[in-house]
Amino acid sequence: MLGKNIILIMTFMENKYYTPEIEIKKYYQPDISEFHVGFEYEYEDINQGGASTSWYKGIIEPKQAYIIDQIYRDEDREYRVKYLDKEDIESLGFIKESIYSHKLNQDYYIEYNSEKPIHTDSIEIKNNQNTLFSGYIKNKSELKKLLKQLNIK
């Protein structure tokens, strides 16, 4: 774990992901290139009559990498991924401090300054005044991967 304070600041900026439609959508259909070990998604079974059954949660485990090819060829299921939200941040161990702030231990913070959906905001990860990351996080799996790359946790 890094010994210095790291702050994640989310500020609204115009970007290629934001449209008014996304503002009300909670899920999107992932591209096959997004799937990887550790990726969290949901799938919906379609019965033989073409009717939907239920949505089920899935995660690609290390010994299940073969499932990515099955997902690509699967015509009997629909797949979706939840956009990043406050609940996802909290599920990674961050504790809500204020309306726009989450804290992990004494070293790490996630802050966002917008009432828009989190995935539409530019995210900056800072270590004091140094920017470690600036960009967009679309879903929980992307945030988990980034935190791991930055050796956070």
Image: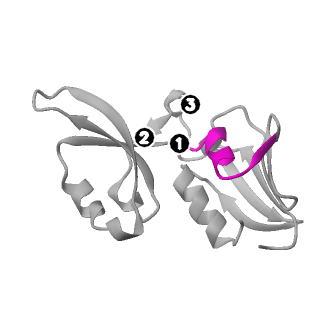
Say which label, 1 or 2, has the lower sequence index.
Answer: 2
- What kind of residue is marked 3? Glu
Q: Position of residue 149 (x, y in %)?
A: 63, 72
With 64 as the anchor, is 16 left or right in this view?
right
Q: Are marks 1 and 2 in contact (CB under 8 Å)?
A: yes
Q: Residue under label 1, please give it.
A: 83
With 138 as the anchor, is 69 left or right in this view?
left
In the image, what residue occupies the spot 57% across and 64% down? 145
Instruction: Report which quarter residue 39 is drawn in.
Output: bottom left
Say which label, 3 or 2, has the lower sequence index.
Answer: 3
- Distance CA(mark 3)–CA(mark 2): 12 Å
- Distance CA(mark 1)–CA(mark 2): 7 Å
**Image: 90 above or below 2:** above
Mark 2 lies on a secondary structure that is strand
- What kind of residue is marked 1? Tyr
Q: Position of residue 5 (x, y in %)?
A: 87, 64
With 48 as the anchor, is 27 left or right in this view?
right
Count of picture labels: 3
Mark 3 lies on a secondary structure that is helix
Q: Residue under label 3, please give it.
A: 23
Closest to the camera, between mark 3 and mark 1, is 1
Q: Residue under label 2, please give it.
A: 28
Is 93 a magenta residue?
yes
